[in-house]
Image: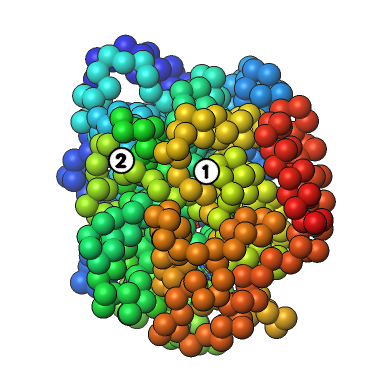
Amino acid sequence: MTNNKSVLAWLDEMKSLLTPDEVVWIDGSEEQLEALRAEACKTGEMIKLNEEKLPGCYLHRTAVNDVARVEGRTFICSKNEEDAGPTNNWMDPDKAYKMLFDIARGSYKGRTMYIIPYSMGPIGSPLSQIGLEVTDSIYVVLNMAIMTRVGKAVLDCLGDSEDWIKGLHSRCDIDEEKRYICHFPEDNYIISVNSGYGGNVLLGKKCFALRIASYLGKNDQWMAEHMLILGIEDPQGNTTYVAAAFPSACGKTNLAMLIPPEGYRAKGYKVFTVGDDIAWMRKGEDGRLYAINPENGFFGVAPGTNVKSNPNALASTQKGTIFTNVVLNNDDNTVWWEGLDKNPPANAVDWKGNPWNGQESAEKGAHPNSRFTAPAKNCPCISPEFDSTKGVPISAIIFGGRRAQTTPLVYQSRDWNNGVFVGSIMASETTAAATGAVGVVRRDPMAMLPFCGYHMGDYFAHWIEMGEILGENAPKIFNVNWFRLDDEGNFLWPGFGDNFRVLEWIVARCNGEADAQETAIGYVPSAKDINLEGLDMDIKVLEDILYVDNAKWLKETEGIEEFYQKFGDRLPEELKAQLAGLKDRLSK
Ligand code: GTP
Ligand code: SPV
Ligand code: MN
């Protein structure tokens, strides 16, 4: 497949360490993938679904102890502990290699070593990067073949270059106690052992495209972010691109694939999806910030996805998709999850593989973090720029999280550095995307808390540096919150497609065409600035969720201050000044 010496040397190391019975190169051909699907069905690793209703679709169940990312067992192994920063777990690289190689040694015995050459981003794009993952899991191979560009073409593009990322995955015994997801940013190396769950094992995704890539970007003036990318086409045919960072399971896939409300569609507004989870961004020749989606598919949250909330995501899953930890409907060999419809199957199997009667059971049938792996090309609103090697120019960056209180529906930062401050103070309720408690508010700067591959203080400094590099071409920065609750715990904002109403204001602000009021935290629209046409919503409620309560915000600054203390002298002076400025404005 290749004569690349650095690749062949590493694979020799891997073979002697892992001692597989067989070695198989993934060439990217449909024949090879089809043979692997058949093999996975034979061993029970995957279940083939109804070919008429869900052509080319499969179901996989992970071990019950292995259903989400494990942040407590995820490590950044930089030479100096300081460089991992206060928000990452750190392990000494020498110790980590030794421990991980000891765990992985001989673990492919009786198994096949699959070698996956993959490209993050369109093959050959100057914004793309190449990796190799070795794995003993067909599920991983088939997911990587959807989520990334794989095969011989990637190796041809790599040629003799040593510029690629090493990834070792071994399922070992799926032993929770020996589960480690380790990153060596200084060595371009990722090692993941004892897991089979997506975010822990599809090494191109969070491990490479965020943790390793964020470090590469810091050193080379680009950005790797936990962001969706979407294009908004107006009736005149102009498209504005925005990127948005929300924490895991907080609405990126939903916003990326949004369908504008009826009134807007009648006028000719359209939304196009470029990406739903990760953005790589670099300054382009014209001085603007250009973004690509390094992925080639969607690893989306299943529960809550339905024909109303996200028809485009649902449509994306109707062929060539792998479902993980959802319900199997025995009657017609299809899948189901909570929130798909109001008709759960009675004759079914739950995500753990046990018989399940959805009409009677009090237990959930699908895991809250059950997922679909769907090819991007299935998405009805995929952007014509999806495969662009140049990327799309970003006009606005949007931050957001789940906040029941305090944070208004939308506001615009005062300028770039104030926007970096807004991103740095993001907080959100935790979700099922990672193991641990759900619904606890935690700080999650730029939605990167679990994904930044180096010291978060240096990451903030890098954001500030990017603002200097981009100058007046820097995107405008906004913050949104779809999740405000009333006293009974009901959402006050309809969300989903109606979020377009907020996007409209954001785009208009970028074009200098919309009003806003200056508040202590930034520019906030008046209720009249958000179009409610066709929506049955009391304008008083909108006023309520746009209101900036200075007393509550002053309380919020105490939490920010405490959080900032963690970063010590690596917290940029600019952000200290931003916090002081906010406190000052709030107390006036
Ligand atoms: P990751 O793939 O984990 O990074 O998540 P994501 O950010 O892509 O999350 P996703 O779009 O899948 O959203 C997950 C959850 O957020 C689902 O439970 C949705 O129902 C809910 N959600 C998304 N958008 C909205 C919204 O506008 N309002 C409300 N109330 N809920 C939303
Ligand atoms: C997330 O948790 O943010 C995801 C899913 O996008 S995973 O790939 O598992 O990390
Ligand atoms: Mn994500």
Residue 200's tag is 1
Residue at x-position 69% and y-position 38%:
575
544 vs 462, left or right, is right
Residue at x-position 82% and y-position 51%:
558
Residue 254 in the image: state x and y as whole percent. 43, 64
162 vs 397, left or right, is left
Does label 1 or label 2 sit earlier along the sequence? Answer: 1
Residue 314 in the image: state x and y as whole percent. 34, 69
Q: Quadrant of residue 320?
A: bottom left
Residue 306 in the image: state x and y as whole percent. 40, 74
Q: Amino acid at mark 2?
A: Gly
Q: How many marks?
A: 2
Q: Secondary structure at mark 2?
A: loop
Q: Amino acid at mark 1?
A: Asn
Residue 432's tag is none
Applied colour scheme? rainbow
Q: Which residue is mark 2?
A: 391
Residue 253 seen from this side? no
Residue 223 seen from this side? yes
Above or below, 491 against 84 in this view is: below
Q: Nearer the viewer, residue 189 or 234?
A: 234
Q: Is mark 1 within 8 Å of ligand 2?
A: yes
Which quadrant is home to the C terminus?
A: bottom right
Residue at x-position 62% and y-position 22%:
78
Q: Nearer the viewer, residue 402 or 349?
A: 402
Q: Secondary structure at mark 1?
A: helix
Few, some or many residues within 10 Å of mark 1 (<14, 14–19, 20+): many
Q: Quadrant of residue 269?
A: bottom left
Q: Nearer the viewer, residue 523 or 17?
A: 523
